[in-house]
Image (spheres, rainbow, N blue to C red):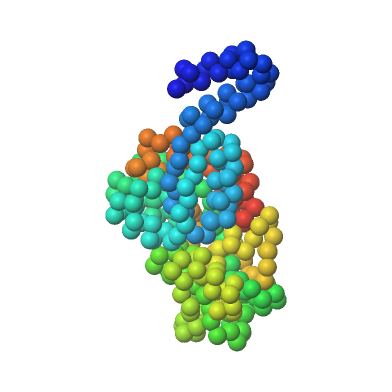
Amino acid sequence: MLHRLASLPRILTAIGWSTSLSTGLFAALLQSAHADTVSVAVAANFTAPMQKIATAFEADTGHKAELSFGATGKFYAQITNGAPFQILLSADDTTPARLEKEGKAVANARFTYAIGTLVLWSAQPGYVDAQGAVLKTGGFKHLAIANPKLAPYGLAAMQAMDKLGVTAQLQPRFVQGENIAQTHQFVATGNAQLGFVALSQVMADGKITSGSAWQVPADLHEPIRQDAALLTPGKDSAAATALLQYLRGDKARAIIKSYGYSF
């Protein structure tokens, strides 16, 4: 295949194509010949930035990222039961380390691709104040939170409420989402007046896109380090290797930063 492609620019030029056009077509076909698809399990909080990154990745490399979004805890269960994901973009750093220890991820290949930020958010402008005092003074009926056993942002929310001393007071008002995407949906649709979500879900281009929010101070919970893992089904995949390298590049990092993550 590659041998036949190598003679293509000469053939096209001979039949009247310009050198630049024939060379450009050759480059495109060569990229297609090497292109592959990588299956990626993506933490729900990273949905929007990863969709943008996947588009840029395909345009720049020819490889395609096939994305599945959900709770990190559920992905862990699926992976240990044989799901053929090649990369996990986790919402924490403990799950990739656990998978590596269990032989489900390639040793020494994991790294932190983003550090997440927790926010208390309401779809209503002006509802959440800049200090988060609404947690103690607000008359809201429902507070959305992701399942802390499955979602690291839910765990961080519980840690923050514990430190603020409001857990017992607020627990009867909890509406629990299976993952951070469902939690955001509860608030966005008004089924909960406010909730703890990822900053990336309510921010684009460095700005809160709607409603009102309080960025939870980092010292109220453990850092939300989000690690990438190369899973064993992807150890020989050129596309998987390329995507992990791409995530560390300037273009991907600019996208990640624009959604409120740090490194």
Rendered residue at 32%/47% (across/down): 104
Answer above or below: position of 86 versus 20.
below
Residue under the point 37% across and 38% down: 235
**Front-lying residue, 56 or 147:** 56
Q: Residue 4 at what x, y percent from top left?
A: 48, 18
Q: Position of residue 229 (x, y in %)?
A: 42, 46
Task: Indicate the quadrant where residue 134 lies.
Answer: bottom right
Question: Does residue 144 appear left or right of residue 88 in this picture?
Answer: right
> As displayed, is residue 58 above or below residue 175?
above
Q: Nearer the viewer, residue 161 or 77?
A: 77
Measuring from the top left, give residue 88's x and y in whole percent.
Answer: 42, 50
Residue 37 image offset from top left, x and y in percent: 45, 40
Residue at the image position 58 percent from the left and 75 percent from the top: 189
Q: Does residue 245 show up?
A: no
Q: Is residue 15 above or below residue 225?
A: above
| Picture mark count | 0
- Outermost residue on the front side: it is 15
Look at the image and tell me whether residue 28 can be seen: yes
Identified at 62% across, 55% down, the residue is 259
Q: Is residue 214 above or below residue 262?
A: below
Apparent side of residue 120 relative to residue 152 in the rendered image (left or right) = right
Quadrant showing the N terminus: top left
